[in-house]
Image: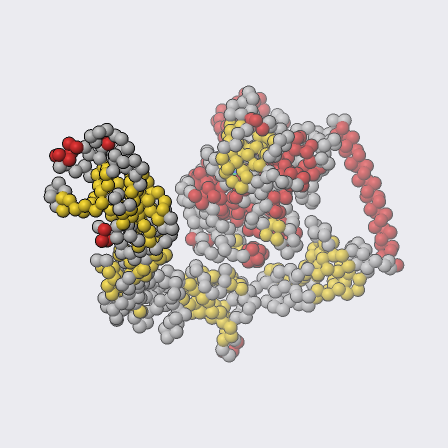
Amino acid sequence: MGDLGWVAYPKNGWEEIGEVDEDYAPIHTYQVCRVMEQNQNNWLHTNWILTEGAQRVFIELKFTLRDCNSLPGGVGTCKETFNMLMKESRYIKIDTIAADESFTELDLGDRVMKLNTEVRDLGPLTRKGFYLAFQDLGACIALVSVRVFYKRCPFLVKSLAEFPDTIPGSEASQLVEVVGHCVNNSLPLYEPPRMHCSTEGEWLVPIGKCVCQPGFEEINGSCKVCKMGFYRSLLDSLACSKCPPHSVARQTGATSCSCEDGYYKIDSDPPNMACTRPPSAPRNAISNVNETSVFLEWSVPMETGGRKDVRYNILCRRVLPDGRGLEECGPNVRFLPRRVALSNTSVMVADLQSHTNYSFLLEAVNGVSELAKDHAKQYVSLNVTTNQAAPSPVSVVRKGHTEKSSIALSWAEPDRPNGIILEYEIKYFEKEQDSSYTIIKSKETEMVVEGLKPSSVYIFQVRARTSAGYGAFSRRFEFQTSPYLTATSERTQALIVAVAITLALVLLAVVAGFLLTVHLGLLPLRRCGYSKAKQDPEEEKMHFHNGHIKFPGVRTYIDPLTYEDPNQAVHEFAQEIDVSFISIERIIGAGEFGEVCSGPLRLPGKREIQVAIKTLKAGYTEQQRRDFLWEASIMGQFNHPNIIRLEGVVTKSKPVMIITEYMENGSLDTFLKKNDGQFTVIQLVGMLRGIASGMRYLSDMGYVHRDLAARNILVNSNLVCKVSDFGLSRVLEDDPEAAYTTRGGKIPIRWTAPEAIAYRKFTSASDVWSYGIVMWEVMSYGERPYWEMSNQDVIKAIEESYRLPGPMDCPEALYHLMMDCWQRERSNRPKFDEIVCLLDKLIRNPSSLKKLVNSSHRVSNLLVEHASVEGDCSTRTQTVGEWLDSIKMGRYTELFMEGGYSSLETVAQMTSEDLRRVGVNLAGHQKKIITNIQEMRVHMNSTNSTVNI
Ligand code: AMP
């Protein structure tokens, strides 16, 4: 109404009128209806409207508007719209308003009010208030109501959070973020709660929430204090919980419960865990003395105190002679795997003094033992007496008088001789020439070593022997021979030179003669045979290739290094494949040089096969490319069902690739771990047989693998195992298991034979040692050899003749074979062909696998003392005579020889007719021999079918 501040201008424009609506209720309106007059410009504006901070304001108009056509006298200047304007600093038009429905004379007569409602919004507003105005330019309008309002999000309590009454933002779709305030003993959970106020005045998108603080729980939207005996600690557990066993909450609102007397909790124990106490003493402790080592074993305590983290500590004390008391064992005594915090119930104590009484206290502790100071410690004690032992190492070796070809050495008796020293052994070799060494013996603590080269540095080591055996060698001592000639040594020298020249000449003549004979085809060449490891200088045989002589029929591994151009080696042994024949589908692993992928290989005219694709990552150096392809140059020389097959290489395009057959089950160690306990013993032995057969092939080729381990065996979908990972550089650099030895080389210690670790003596016999470890990995389904023992402890334990114990449920026969592979003396280890032979026997006679390893050889976490067991496959190939003897037909040996059947290969081809021809006439004997020949053929087929000599 005008008295509320409406102002009309000019005076004869808008008029304030009191009326009644259709229900005869009084209404006040402003009207204007100067439709017949020209140039109308009638304003009606409000007083100053305060916005109260709102930035967006809504205006709702209710009005009626006359239909110009219904006016008597025609339209004339009649309008059917009016303008709505606003002013903060000057007037701005908000909109032109038209009626949805205009009224006519008729409506007036019927008293029907065709009321229009229009809503407009304004914003953003920047001032504290504004004016609103309606401009009429000649219409017939009755303005019934004008409502100016803004929207707000009302005060809200949600999830224990309070959100204040909030005015929305100025933009149409804007959301105003509001941070809530946690009420009533509650706290924000993870982050402060937030809500969003929309322009429509609605709360949207709640984020976060409040929860009752510890000691309270939410009941019906508010936080109630926890009762006595209950507690609530974490923000994310909603209700108060009853105190766990052996703990109490004596007040309401507890955030944790306190332990009863004699019970404890450590910080890392979860609040809902019962209070616990220290364990009782270990039980059933037993000791087993072995020279100066003692193996202690016990059972878990009767009472673990309610915890799972029971550990054991050992206190070792030496009983002093004549009852003078006890003295703690010094730092020289070694505990395997350690002295304190043992998680297993056994320990090996080594390096004790011989013939000495010791007292061991075994204590069980758990996580709360430290807190339970008042709790009397409970021990179990064991008294043991050590036996005789080998002498301790000689600590110092001194150099005496030195000449051009000799050095005088002296040393002191070991600190602990542990008996009467019978003799000393002196081992020496020229520095850097450690592939061969010499051992001489002396009964004294001095000796002159002769026959040395002048001006040369030699390495010397000394060890003592008593009736208990040899002690360990002393550390290495380096001494140099003198460069000056003395009268006597000069004479000797001259003599040596003369002899050497003579020998060289003789040797030259022999070699020349030999080559000539071969060249002329006069000398019968070895058809089947075992060509020794090429990398082994001691066993090395000459192999000629690459422009030299290559013996026909004898396949040997050719070191790619013999090629001046490494590319030539690759292309000699590997087929170049056009990259368009390969499609990469998946990544299956990571290699040293790049990703390993898989996909189909479609060679023209051949059926499609799945292959593994090793790629060389971009940005490689020429050296890396060479190293990468090195493996292909080696792999390409092999052709055996148990060696990963090379399909070819891609070198003419990038990336450079090596393509091999695809092995669906990936590497053996991971495969076994994934399928723990899933295979029959025969399946496992079958896998081992495959690996041994592949290794027999490699050793026959003269290739020493050096990194035989389950991780380097691949398994296909038929469980066929194939040896992979070739290339020397990889052994040294790529294998994550390879560790630097004291001599700087990188060696996978746990898999490597002691002589290979000590002086890099890698041979097929050291591969056999590794094969024994692979057997152990397979039979224990991928367990880590020597568990968590350090590499240093492994080396020491092996040196002291300890070996891995038999895996759980391992057939005794297999464990014996492993132990044979781990013979210290490498010549005593079985050869791969014997291993294959033995495994075949076991497979053919599964009952031989029934007997499992004795449980005393199976105690986890310790090593067992090595005891050699003879394999039942002879090292030598059986002769025809031996074979006939074995089937009790030895009487025919001579007849067989005379008939030309001097090898088992020829015997295997014999028919009944041949038998008659050599003179086996008795039908019963013929039958027996033929049956055994048939068996021999089966055996030969299963063992030799793939050997390609
Ligand atoms: P490598 O560089 O040879 O050690 O290969 C790395 C990983 O790729 C291996 O551990 C396997 O998991 C996988 N791999 C390599 N070659 C093959 C293959 N021929 N078939 C299936 N997987 C393979």
Q: Residue at x 26, y 43 (%)?
A: 13
Instruction: State whether residue 494 is above or below residue 376.
Output: above
Instruction: State whether residue 695 is above or below residue 319.
Output: above
Identify the image quadrant of residue 256. Answer: bottom left
Q: Residue at x 60, y 45 (%)?
A: 731
In which quadrant is the C terminus drawn? top right
Judge left or right: residue 305 versus residue 917. Answer: left
Q: Residue at x 17, y 32 (%)?
A: 105
Q: Residue at x 24, y 32 (%)?
A: 68
How many marks the image carries: the answer is 0
Identify the image quadrant of residue 637. Answer: top right
Tell me the colour scheme of the image: secondary structure
Please state the horizontal and vertical placement of residue 919, each as a whole percent of the image: 57, 24
Judge left or right: residue 444 versus residue 868. Answer: right
Please state the horizontal and vertical placement of residue 112, each as a whole percent of the image: 14, 36
Please state the horizontal and vertical placement of residue 689, each as a whole percent of the image: 51, 38
Judge left or right: residue 43 versus residue 458. Answer: left
Please state which of residues 215 and 760 is positioned toward the viewer in this rendering. 215
Please state which of residues 648 and 328 is positioned toward the viewer in this rendering. 648
Whether residue 511 is visible to the viewer of this picture, yes or no, is yes
Judge left or right: residue 394 versus residue 212. Answer: right
Please state the horizontal and vertical placement of residue 583, each as a whole percent of the image: 53, 29
Whether residue 702 is visible to the viewer of this picture, yes or no, is no
Please state which of residues 123 and 464 is positioned toward the viewer in this rendering. 123
